[in-house]
Structure formats: C-alpha cells, structure tokens
Image (cartoon, rainbow, N blue to C red):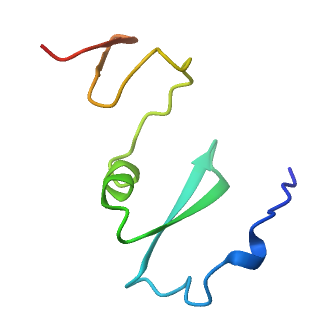
Amino acid sequence: MTDINPIAGQVPSDIKDTTKYKWFACVCDGEVADIQVFSINSERTIAVFSSNPIIIPIEPDDAAIGDLYVDGVFTEPS
C-alpha cells in the first residue's frame, strides 16, 4: 500500500526528539501498517494509544467519549 503524505513538508525538524514527541507503531497481522507520532502535549491521545485500544468502526452517532463498550454494545455510563 502506498499513501501520499501531503504534509510531509510540514514535519517538524525535531520530530525524533522523544522528549517532545511520542511514537506508536500500529501493527496489523504482525506487520507495521502505520506509525503515529503525537506531541507530548496530546496527553489524552497518548493515554489512549498506550492502553492497547480496541479499534471499532462506528457510524457518527454510535458512540461518545466516555460511553461503555460491553459485549459489542455502546452504552452511556449510569
């Protein structure tokens, strides 16, 4: 698979500085399918990616941040 990265020219020169950025490899079926890099200021996103998330395709109104996911169903917490 080849993706064109239109923002390649906008990559910060210090992108490999791990005191400023957190890197994640997205592995699918034993193969690195993507690499995500986040500023250390993106605390919630880093917490999500650090927690072995389950990725579930949804429709726009299927779930909201904070909902629970149990047995394949999204529900609002009580």
In this rendering, the answer to whether 17 lies above or below 28 is below
Horizontal and vertical percent position of residue 12: 61, 83
Instruction: State the residue at coordinates (37%, 85%).
Output: 19
Horizontal and vertical percent position of residue 78: 12, 13
Please name whichever residue, 59 or 50, is drawn nearer the observer in this view of the structure.
59
Q: In this view, does 45 lie to the left or right of 70?
A: right
Q: In this view, does 66 lie to the left or right of 64?
A: left
Total marks shown come to: 0
Horizontal and vertical percent position of residue 20: 41, 82
Instruction: State the residue at coordinates (81%, 63%).
Output: 6
Q: Which residue is most to the left?
A: 78
Instruction: State the residue at coordinates (37%, 58%).
Output: 46
In this rendering, the answer to whether 32 lies above or below 68 is below
Horizontal and vertical percent position of residue 32: 65, 56
Instruction: State the residue at coordinates (80%, 62%).
Output: 5
Within the image, what quadrant is residue 35 found in?
bottom right
Within the image, what quadrant is residue 18 found in?
bottom left
In this rendering, the answer to whether 37 lies above or below 74 is below
In this rendering, the answer to whether 21 lies above or below 62 is below
